[in-house]
Image (cartoon, rainbow, N blue to C red):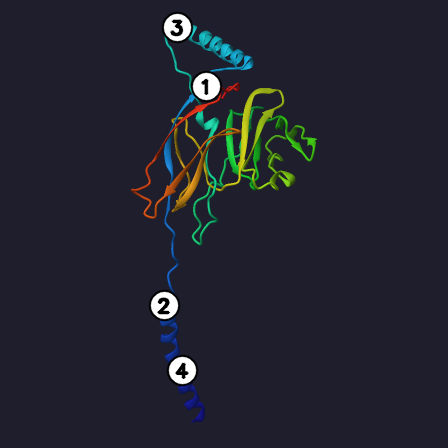
């Protein structure tokens, strides 16, 4: 009889506690989501005329190439010079805050450099300075990838051999002494392949998680950011051409107008 009385009391206690615990669970405040908005815009870019003797020689050789090409196609056609903006122009938001509890989108994903047939298409990559740059050799021969002028701790870095079908992290990332100066916001390294002059590339490492390349048609869209004040830079490979302040209002959508930017790019002696 005593055992039955204890069992009934225990059951009553459980029945009383369950609604209380459920009520407490319902009172937990919902996780607040911070709204984010994307900064978009269009870049109208032109290239400055050549000024140095080296630039003038490059411009002359380009004209010869265009004339020889159109001579066998349509000698009357005149094509405006095409600027491959995706190969040289990046947009970076510098003073972005650390991710809030609901992670905001970041530009951390990047396609690796893929080498096919001992060469690769000229292009540029933008990464966070703590990220690793990967190269994949899709071919049947060894290739040697290097960054001209790359120096680590006073020692020049030589070409790195990539065996066929290998995925490797290339040691061109800013490391050690290079990253101690917090005033340095970016590092830019050229990429080349030994014996392949057409393989031209560049890796731009930035102290930011929010960046993008400008499309060839001049449009761009940064990863979403919360409301706030940001410094947006337009970078041509290894230099800042223009920096302007952009304010994302609290309501964001409907108030944040696309940017319209006009930029004069320095004359490029490279093919892209």
Q: Is residue 72 visible?
A: no
State the mark number for residue 75. Answer: 3
Residue 178 in picture, x, y percent from top left: 62, 38
26 is higher (above) or lower (below) than 110: below
> Which label lies toward us, 2 or 3?
2
> Which label lies toward us, 3 or 1?
1
Disc 3/disc 1 C-alpha distance (Å) = 26 Å
Camera-side residue of 149 and 247:
247
> Which label lies toward us, 2 or 4?
2
Q: Outermost residue toward the right?
A: 155
Q: Verify CB contact (< 8 Å) between mark 3 and mark 1.
A: no
Residue indicated by mark 2: 27
Residue indicated by mark 4: 13
Residue 129 in picture, x, y percent from top left: 55, 39
Residue at image position (57%, 36%) is 134
Callout 2: few (<14), some (14-19), or many (20+) C-alpha neighbours within 10 Å? few
Circle 2: element type: loop
Circle 3: element type: loop
Sooner in the amino-acid sequence: mark 1 or mark 4 = 4
Residue 151 in picture, x, y percent from top left: 66, 31
1 is higher (above) or lower (below) than 78: below
230 is higher (above) or lower (below) than 242: below
Disc 4/disc 3 C-alpha distance (Å) = 95 Å
Circle 1: element type: loop
Q: Verify CB contact (< 8 Å) between mark 2 and mark 3.
A: no
Sooner in the amino-acid sequence: mark 4 or mark 3 = 4
Disc 2/disc 4 C-alpha distance (Å) = 22 Å
Residue indicated by mark 1: 48
Camera-side residue of 149 and 230:
230
Callout 3: few (<14), some (14-19), or many (20+) C-alpha neighbours within 10 Å? few
> Which label lies toward us, 4 or 3?
3
Residue 154 in picture, x, y percent from top left: 70, 33
């Amino acid at each position: 009889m005593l055992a039955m009385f204890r069992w009934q009391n225990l059951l009553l206690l459980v029945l009383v506690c369950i609604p209380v615990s459920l009520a407490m669970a319902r009172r937990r405040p919902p996780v607040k989501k911070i709204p984010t908005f994307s900064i978009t815009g269009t870049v109208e870019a032109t290239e400055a005329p050549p000024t140095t003797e080296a630039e003038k020689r490059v411009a002359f050789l380009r004209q010869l190439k265009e004339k020889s090409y159109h001579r066998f196609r349509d000698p009357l056609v005149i094509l405006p010079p095409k600027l491959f903006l995706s190969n040289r122009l990046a947009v970076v938001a510098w003073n972005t805050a650390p991710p809030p509890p609901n992670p905001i989108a970041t530009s951390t994903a990047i396609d690796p450099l893929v080498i096919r047939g001992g060469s690769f298409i000229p292009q540029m990559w933008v990464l966070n300075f703590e990220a690793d740059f990967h190269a994949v050799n899709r071919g049947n021969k060894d290739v040697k990838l290097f960054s001209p002028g790359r120096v680590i701790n006073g020692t020049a870095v030589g070409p790195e051999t990539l065996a066929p079908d290998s995925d490797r992290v290339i040691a061109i990332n800013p490391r050690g002494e290079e990253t101690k100066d917090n005033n340095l916001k970016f590092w830019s390294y050229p990429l080349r392949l030994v014996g392949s002059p057409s393989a031209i590339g560049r890796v731009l490492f930035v102290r930011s998680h929010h960046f993008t390349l400008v499309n060839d048609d001049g449009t761009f869209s940064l990863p979403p950011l919360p409301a706030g004040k940001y410094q947006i830079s337009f970078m041509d490979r290894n230099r800042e051409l223009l920096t302007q302040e952009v304010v994302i209002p609290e309501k964001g959508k409907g108030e944040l107008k696309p940017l319209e930017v006009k930029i004069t790019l320095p004359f490029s002696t490279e093919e892209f």
